[in-house]
Amino acid sequence: MKIRQGLTALVLGAGMVVSAYAEESPWYIGITGGAMLFKANMGVGGGALASPEIATNIGVMGGYLWNVARMGSLAVEGAFTDTASRGNYSVQDIGGTAAVQTLALYGVYRSPGTFYIKAKAGALNEKLSIARAHVSVVNSSDLRAAVGLGGGFNFGVSPGGSRVEIEYTLIEEDVNFVSVSYRF
């Protein structure tokens, strides 16, 4: 009898946990990473970048989601990325490295469906660091508008479910970010 009561309590408890989890919070967090792409003719310290290599950035993102019925969802989303692997380049046969740190706040639209389109626009603070022969050539910080377009896959049955997203973000005229994100 006690075993049966214990099992009943366990099943009811598990059911309450699953029910509480099913009522997902509109808040979400995730991880992101990808490639910072530098334009080859970007002017740096007396020359233009020759053969720039990709810098790799990783970061975190989070936001608040509003489901807009059959039209998809809207969100306010923040993201922070920092360089994990600096990009290499050369100017007049002298090698150097480039790194970008970003902090952004976006308004986001996601279309309805399991596979969906994501569009975002907002403000981004970019810190660009370029060094040549171990000497800092550029160390700038700019606040600018940024836009992005991508797509994703929703693992859950609701707009707040786990997702994988691929995006292309225009950070500035000379720097763009191609990223993959996983949202919890």
Image: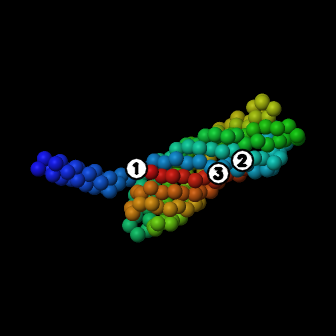
Residue 11 percent coordinates (x, y): 23, 53
Above or below 126: residue 4: below
Residue type of the residue flagged with mark 3 = Phe
Q: Which mark, residue 98? A: none
Residue carrying label 1:
27
Residue carrying label 3:
177
Instruction: Answer with left or right where residue 152 lies relative to residue 131.
Output: left
Question: Looking at the image, which residue is at 20% across and 51% down?
Answer: 7
Quadrant location of residue 19? bottom left
Residue type of the residue flagged with mark 1 = Trp
Scheme of colours in the image: rainbow
List the single residue furthest toward the left.
1
Residue carrying label 2:
54
Mark 3 in CB contact with mark 2 (< 8 angstroms): no
- The span from disc 2 to disc 1 (Cα, nearest Å) is 32 Å
List the single residue furthest toward the top.
135
Q: Secondary structure at mark 1?
A: strand
Instruction: Answer with left or right where residue 177 lies relative to residue 3.
Output: right
Disc on the earlier residue, 1 or 3: 1
Residue type of the residue flagged with mark 2 = Ile
Quadrant location of residue 121? bottom right
Residue 168 percent coordinates (x, y): 62, 56
Q: Nearer the viewer, mark 3 or mark 2?
A: 2
How many neighbours does mark 3 have within 10 angstroms: few (below 14), some (14-19), or many (20 or more)? many
Disc on the earlier residue, 2 or 1: 1
- The span from disc 1 to disc 3 (Cα, nearest Å) is 24 Å
Residue 10 seen in the figure:
yes
Residue 148 percent coordinates (x, y): 59, 57
Instruction: Answer with left or right where residue 129 lies relative to residue 96.
Output: left
Disc on the earlier residue, 3 or 2: 2
